[in-house]
Image (tube, helix red, strand yellow):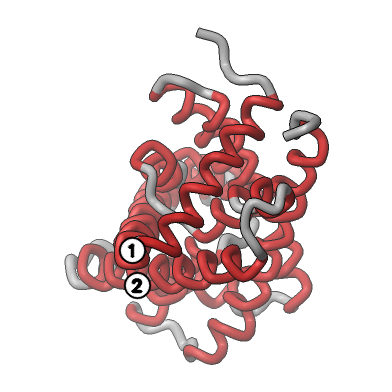
Amino acid sequence: MQIKTPEEITEAAIAAGKAKVARTLRRPLSLIVSSILAGAFIAIGGILSLIVGYGFPELTAGNPSLQRLLSGAMFPIGLILVVVLGVDLFTGNNALLMPGYMKRDYPLSAVVRNWSIVYIGNFIGAVGFTWLFVYYAGLTSGEPYHSAIIGIGEAKTSMAWTVVMVKGMGANWLVCLAVWLALSGHTLVEKALGCWLPVMAFVALGYEHSIANMFYLPLAMMEGARLSVDTCLTNNLIPATIGNIIGGALFVGCVHTYLHRRSGK
């Protein structure tokens, strides 16, 4: 079976957006549960990326790209779980709700409502998983993971605001391209491969994904990093979120709908 054409992908995105808005309006509790699961799935990708990427210090000390490659190769399991199991991820929804909005199937208020609920649910799922299944389980209590996560947290909150925003744009451009590629596939292998390649790229390049940072930053604080909630919000999560919206909604959702929406529909 051949993969979908760009026009068919756009139609699939329109259908997905309609379903997500319908869930927002008619089944808000279902949306919250779905969002919590998605946040936990991204945290699973985060801890696997950390454990494998930083688990070979002798090999990566003189080969920094190897650490990035290992981390990038592991992280996509989070998006694969999100896409295949049909749960709601804020960054993916940034793109998926744009085609239907551009068709005027639903108003901007429905888009903002979905994004807001999903963002909060993702946060609950990511932080809850991080505390219980990572910190409490002691996965990062020993070296090199303890020092690695503290360094990651401090690095993510020490960049210029505009740099974080631009890196957020890059991250969700790639994440939403992964969602678009997954929409083109019919089999599990096709969907997983579509998710894996762009997500691996965003992690290896060091871009900023707001939901992933809901794992990294709280874990860094739990492990003793000298970070405050205010610092994490103002120095990273807010600019990363703004960048994610631009990269996903504009660069993928709007642009690809404009290019490939079937005329008359």
In the rendered structure, the answer to whether residue 91 lies left or right of residue 74 reads right
Please give the name of the residue rendered at 55% of the width and 54% of the height, measured from the top-left corner.
93
Q: Nearer the viewer, residue 61 or 203?
A: 203
Q: Are marks 2 and 1 in contact (CB under 8 Å)?
A: yes
Residue 80 — which label? Answer: none
Mark toward the start of the polypeptide (2 vs 1): 1
Q: Nearer the viewer, residue 248 or 134?
A: 248
Residue 141 percent across, percent down from the top left: 26, 70
Residue 184 percent across, percent down from the top left: 57, 26
Q: Vertically, is 223 above or below 263?
A: below
Mark 2 vs mark 1, CA separation in Å: 6 Å
Per the image, the residue denoted by label 2 is 124
- Is residue 50 something that shows in the picture? no
Quadrant location of residue 109?
bottom right
What amino acid is found at the position of numbered circle 1 in the picture? Ile
Q: Vertically, is 123 above or below 75?
A: below
Q: Vertically, is 106 above or below 261?
A: below
Quadrant location of residue 245?
bottom right
In the rendered structure, the answer to whether residue 153 lies left or right of residue 128 reads right
Q: Please rate how many residues cluster around mark 2, counting C-alpha atoms within 10 Å: few if below 14, some from 14 to 19, many from 20.
A: many
Please give the name of the residue rendered at 62% of the width and 30% of the height, measured from the top-left corner.
9
Please give the name of the residue rendered at 75% of the width and 29% of the height, measured from the top-left corner.
262
Residue 156 percent across, percent down from the top left: 59, 72
Q: Vertically, is 246 above or below 225?
A: above
Per the image, the residue denoted by label 1 is 36
- Is disc 1 placed on a helix, strand or loop? helix
Q: Nearer the viewer, residue 206 or 94?
A: 94
